[in-house]
Structures are given as structure tokens and as C-alpha cells.
Amino acid sequence: MESIIRKDDADRAAAALADPDAARACFDWQEARALLTGLPGGALNIGYEAVDRHVAQGHGSEVAVRWIGKDDTRRELTYADMADLSSRFANVLAAHGLTQGDRLFALMGRTPELYGAAIGTLKAGLVFTPLFSAFGPEPIRTRMEIGEANVLLTTASIYRRKIAAWRDEIPSLKLVLIAGDEAPERCVALAPALAAASETFEVAQTEPEDRALIHFTSGTTGKPKGAVHVHQAVLYHAYSGRNALELTPGTIYWCTADPGWVTGTSYGIIAPLVNRVTMIVDEAEFDVERWYGIIEREKVEVWYSAPTAIRMMMRAGAGAAAAFDFSSLKFLASVGEPLNPEAVTWSHQVFGRPFHDNWWQTETGGIMIANTRAMDVHPGSMGKPLPGIEAAIVEREDGTLRQCKAGKIGELALRPGWPSMMRTYLHEQARYDKCFVGGWYLSGDLAMQDADGYFWFVGRADDLIKSSGHLIGPFEVESALIEHDAIAEAGVIGIPDETAGEIVKAYVTLNAGYEASEDLERDVRGHARKRLGPAVAPRQIVFRKTLPKTRSGKIMRRLLKARELGLPDGDISTLETDET
Amino acid sequence: MTPQELKAAFIEELIKVAPDIEADMVGDDDHIQDDLELDSMDVLNLVTALHARFGVDIPESDYPQIATPALAVAYLAKSG
């Protein structure tokens, strides 16, 4: 076991939350409210809190976004620039007849326009939904259908390759905005539209409970779920950004997550801007020396990253880091999947400070459990609940819940009521209701709490796969696989991988007339990648004559997984046909 | 190996990792991540495959040198 990393008095004194245990004991949301400004008459708007109020309060000349392009081009946007860009974007939406409550989907790389558009969408009172730009057409379409998208913001290349073929089959879609100067037919080019729009816009007077964000997350069965978040969530973005990530005004902060996922929105757009930091945005993908160079050159102080990236840095070795100066770093945090203890210890040695793991979900909208700056780090633990958050390990028993004792594994549960909690799953009230039992929200994660109060992740309680920090629903992958002519049935599981945490593996049976072969394996994998994109598609496909199934015909993923891992089969009383 | 043979072998390994790519659509200067849409796990798998085929160890810091078929051919010729 890796040894505990103790914090000294200087670290504790510098922390936003100097004494988390004391703060937990006398927490009051009213104090957190002081981080916000608000609009007249009790209205609250995330876009206003993130940008416009800072300008109104005399901070317009401070840098909001320092953007680094793939080709190392640099662009700085002050808070005044962000206010201007987002107001223009809001005016473009209004000019096309879009109004409060309409839904905008964003699907593009990390450019300044994306950040301006996100804020502009919120200022206009529209609901913002980011999608991961490496998704294939299938996940994009499913999410736009469920979310009844009215506007899509994307690039010409993504539009031609992934959208154009089925655009007309989304009846709600009124406007497609294309980043840049030119747009394909029936789309609107964003750059000239922004240039022509006014730079002033009156922020929509949204109520705290009005919808602001919809983030899609995967389910084990059925379609992806759209977790609905409201403007009130900004209170928690502000509070948790300050206390779990040390985001104070002027801090130089780099969140490496893409805004296509919830981390990249909550902590890659909203929390940092609300806390008036300078955000670093890198358009390029992970590259170890590029990343180290950015920390050194931009003097990054707070760095929020993910286990897969950290493990890739470990693979590159301490030698790759030796040439760089990391002395600007004050606080490092990690999220997406559990950070293994070796990675915590390694980062402490290489960067002089450890990565602090934290835990939350799309549904919770913000960080729930964290190792904060003042806390001693127990490597491998996700930390303790932030003040204001009540968490417990519970066990289901006859439709009620029982809290587990320290050291016992159970389901991680949270007491609802914090501001950024999802308000529903879009059009799926029943699925939402099922998340709550006996006054607790059940996270679906298995965990344990030790005698010191630290929480430790154990695994998922369901079949969801966590690969490179992304939650992948096996059903969505299986559905795409069986669309291939050769495939009769598919069972999809996650198998352990030392870099990605898990990778997606598919077990498939073939239709009559098809023979298993290397060529067919490649053809099916290629099909899945085209439909789903590389992050979601299986990396491995194996052919079987039959799959293990229950009497009701359900494929037993759990059994496939137990066998893959060399574990006992467990309860197989429902097994009707076995794998051959 | 000639540069042509190296290129053919590189593209063959590339397509094993990412079979959604069609060999005759790959340009010499296509970036494997930006243009051909490999993700970082794909890149790791490609590096493993190139190691198995050519016996070259490609350290993380050299990944930019295999980012396009043209760059990779030059790199593999030098390393091989």
C-alpha cells in the first residue's frame, strides 16, 4: 500500500477550505451564495454569472481564456471579449427566431467560438447540450432525437461526414451553425453572422429552476439518458470550483477535459469563469511533451486532468518530465475514474504535488467527494464529501436501505438537495424515480468508507463500462453491432486495461452464411467505429456459436465478464443456454 | 524495405487498429488523429503493432514523428 501524503501547515493555510471537517459541521448554502451576484427579481443566469457580471464589476480586462491552437497559434480573450462574443452569439440565435427554452447542441473541437457559444446560449436562455466531437453519427443522432435539438453548432467537416445524411429526419432542428467563414447548403456560417450581430444583448431573466444544461449519459439498457440541470446549478459550480479545485480570481487553470463531456462543461467552462480565473484551452489532443510544455510556459497553477492521461504520462516515464519546470503548480486534481495509488505517488514525486482524486457523475453536476488541498491524501481514495454533501454506503434490503458500517462494501448514495443535482432524465421520469430509495440518491457505484471517513471506489453495480473516463452503455454498442449483416447477437463488456481503466470487448454470434475470420472481425469493428466513433466502439471482437442467456433470452454480460476475468460464475440459476 | 514497402506496411497496421479507414483514402500527410480520427488508445495500439512488426521501440516523445504516413515512413526507415 502506498503511504499517506501528509499536508503541512503552509498547505492548509493556503487552501480555500482550510479545515474541511469544521466546515462540514457548520455548513450553510447562504454563505456559498456570496460567490454569486444574481439578476434583479431573483432571476439567475449561468452565462451572466460566468462572464457579464465580471465586466460590470470592473474586471473586463482580465484574461478569461488563453487559447492554444493545434499549430501553436495563441489567442487571448478577456472577460470583456467573452461578453462581446457571447452576446453576438445570443443575438444570432435570437435573429433566427430561437427563444428561451429552445435547445442547442454543440459538436466541435475546442476553439474560442465554442466557449463563446456555450455562454451565449445560456445568456439567451436556451438549453446547452455538448456532445463529444469524436462520436460517430449514431450516438449523435440518438441524442439529438431524444433532446429534440433545435440548433446544432458544428464544423463543416463534421456536418458533411456525420450529419448531412439524416439532418432532415430530426423534425425539431431549425438551424445548423457552422464554425468559420463558409457553410454547406442550408447551414449558416458562424463567423460572418457573429460579425454582423450586435455586441450587446440583454441576458434572459431565467429563473433558478429553469433548464440550462442537458448532459447525456449511458444506461445499461435502453437509450442514453439526458440528465437535466438548471441555472441554480451555478451555485454549486462556483462553490465546488472554489473549494475542491482552488479556483480563485486570477488563478491560471487548465482543465484538460473536452467540453463534450460533463467535466469539460462544469469545470472546463462554467466553474472557472464564474470564479474569474484564466483558463488555458488547448485545441490539440494529448501529447506528453506538449502538455508539460504548456504547464511550464503558461505557468499553470491548478491542473484538473484524468487517470488515463496521468497513466500515459507514467508510461512516458519521469525522464520525459525532467526537462520541464513545474514549480508554478499549486494544486492537481483528477476525475473520471478512480486514480490508482501508484499514480498518486508518482505524480507527487514527478510534479512535487500529488494528483487529488475526486468523484462525481453526470447526474450530480458537480464534485461530490474530493481530496481537497488541506486534506492528507490517502492514495487510491476519492476523499471525503465536500461540506454540504451527505454521502453514505448503503445496502438494499426489502425495498429499503440500510447504512453500512465502516469497511463494508455497498452502494454509494447521496442525500439529494445540492443545487447542481439533476432535476430529471429527459422524458424518462420513471428511470429518474428509480434512482431514489428512502430519501437517498443511488449512484450505481460500489464503494467503501474507511474508519477515517475516506471513501474508496470498488466498481460499478451495473454493466456500464468506464473507458478512458467515459461511461459507455453496452446496449448502445450492442445495438450498433447487430446492425451489421453478419451479426446475430452481441454481448458487450468492459475488460481491464492498464491505461484506459477498461476497454470495450464484444462477444458476437453470426447469422447463417457467415464464417468467423480475421477479415470479418475487422469489417465488424470498422462498422462499429463508423457508427459509434473510436471512443465507444469495441476494441476487441470475438466470435461465439452461442452466448450465455437467461430463460427470458437476456444475454448474461455478468457471466461473460466473470469468465473473462477468471472469476467464479456466481449465481447461474437463471442461465438457460450457455456460451459455446 | 523501400519507402513504398514501409508505407504499405504502416497503412496495413493502421487499418488493423482502425478498420473504419479505407487504405486508398489515406493521404501521405493525413494526421492520424486530426484527419483519420484515431484516439489516443488507438495510437497506443498502433505503436504496439509497429513494435511487433518492425521491432522498433517508439517512446512517447516520438509519437509526433509517426503522426502522418510520410513522417512515419521516414521515422521507420531511420529506426529500422
Image (cartoon, coloured by chain):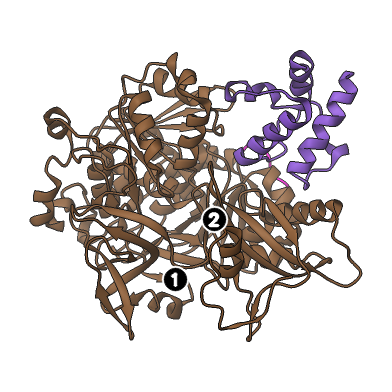
Label 1 sits on a secondary structure element that is: strand
Chain A drawn in what color?
A: brown
Which chain does the residue under circle 1 lie in?
A
Residue B76 in which image quadrant: top right
Residue A280, percent across and down? Answer: 41, 31
Q: Which residue is mark 1?
A: A425
Q: Which residues are magenta?
A: A180-184
In the rendered structure, the answer to whether residue A308 lies left or right of residue A107 reads left
Q: Which residue is mark 2?
A: A105
Q: Which chain is purple?
A: B
**Residue at the spot x=35%, y=33% of the render?**
A345
**Residue at the spot x=66%, y=54% of the render?**
A537
Which chain does the residue under circle 2 lie in?
A
Amino acid type, residue under disc 1 in the picture: Tyr
* Total count of labels: 2
Q: Which mark is residue A94?
A: none
